[in-house]
Amino acid sequence: MLLNYIFDNIFVMDNLYRLRIFAHICKTLNFTESARQLHLAQPAISRHIKSLEDELGRTLFLRQKRKVQLTQEGRSLLLQIDPLLSEFDRIFNDFILEKTTVAGILRIGSIFEAGTYLYMDHLIRFQSSFPQIEIRIEFGSSDRLFQKISMGEIDFALVSRLQNDSSIASFTLFRDHPVLVGNSTKKKIDSENKIPLISYREEDYYTDEFLKRKWSSAQRKNIQYLGSVSSHEAMLYWALKSNAYCIVPHSSYLRSRYRNELKIFDEDSKESSLNLIYLKTTMTELRKKIFLQNMQDFLNHNQVS
């Protein structure tokens, strides 16, 4: 009955759409960022909010230059609609799944570390919820995964760097920040002498960016690269055994089996992001839509931690 009423009532559907936009902006407090994530033009976002405010006779946001704040009325509305939107999603998804068998193949790519440690558990849980969907996972570099998405060879990918391609949509699934780690027996970094360092790859932009932001040119000149290995755990082990240092995401350090023998010597507050990407034009099959919704729910529940 609820679904029939909603689908038969255009007025309700329009306001439901506006309420979803409103709820999204409440999380970002940024009209431009919400427009980007929702794949809408920023003026369209503003029009929807204006229409909602006119309909309710309430001001929901205070907009001063680049700062956006919720009004008291906005906070009250959010508290009331958040559980309702979640319940609607549950009813809608249950209704679809009761009438449709979700089956087929999902081809998913990921950079190695994130796919192994951050992403894999959630993919396994998703597949257990939809056992007739076969998931095929492959690892690769961000650049290679972008190529595969563009060519339609995979459906989704988790990457660490984005490219300027209007045909590809993305949203941030995880955030992290880099730390410089070494053997815990060391008291401090001796920057007067050669500083042994392990990198992830030969041209390691993650390490290079950290050093440019945090270290002086004199310190950088003292770096002695011992080698590279494309595994954070292997980097940490190598650094531990050779009294060297390496720069890895904080989550990799926290997960490491060698954590008790290592310590953080320096860290950067600048966050890096891991983004889920997909080709906009291929989001027609039900299994892809459900997977995308599942990832967005995962993001909302975990607040991009």
Image (tube, helix red, strand yellow):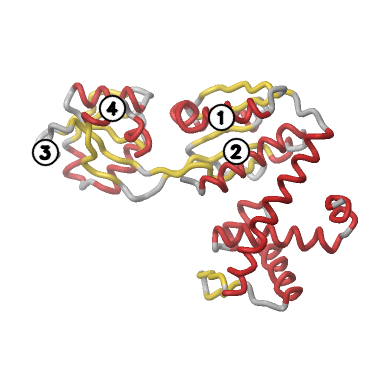
Q: Is residue 56 left or right of residue 109?
A: right
Whether residue 297 is situated above or below residue 77 in the rendered picture:
above
- What secondary structure is found at the residue carrying circle 3? loop
Of the numbered discs 4 and 3, the one sitting upstream in the chain is 3
The amino acid type, in three-letter code, at marker 3 is Lys
Residue 125, percent from left and from top: 59, 29
Q: Toward the viewer: 122 or 235?
A: 122
Would you call the spot at circle 1 few (<14 residues within 10 Å), some (14-19), or many (20 or more)? many
Quickly name the residue at label 1.
145
Gap in angstroms between the C-alphas marked 2 and 1: 9 Å
User: Do residues under tags 2 and 4 come within 8 Å of each other at their CB atoms?
Assistant: no
The amino acid type, in three-letter code, at marker 2 is Ile
Question: Residue 215 got which mark?
Answer: none
Quickly name the residue at label 4.
236
Gap in angstroms between the C-alphas marked 2 and 4: 29 Å
Quickly name the residue at label 2.
277
- Residue at 13% x, 31% y: name it: 185
User: Do residues under tags 2 and 1 come within 8 Å of each other at their CB atoms?
Assistant: yes
Of the numbered discs 2 and 4, the one sitting upstream in the chain is 4
Residue 158, percent from left and from top: 54, 34
Gap in angstroms between the C-alphas marked 3 and 2: 42 Å
Gap in angstroms between the C-alphas marked 4 and 3: 17 Å
Of the numbered discs 4 and 1, the one sitting upstream in the chain is 1
Select label 3 or label 2 by which is in front.
3
Residue 212, percent from left and from top: 29, 45
Looking at the image, the residue that sits furthest to the bottom is 57
- What secondary structure is found at the residue carrying circle 4? helix
Whether residue 166 is situated above or below residue 68 in the rendered picture:
above
Select label 2 or label 4 by which is in front.
4
Q: Is residue 141 left or right of residue 259?
A: right
Quickly name the residue at label 3.
187
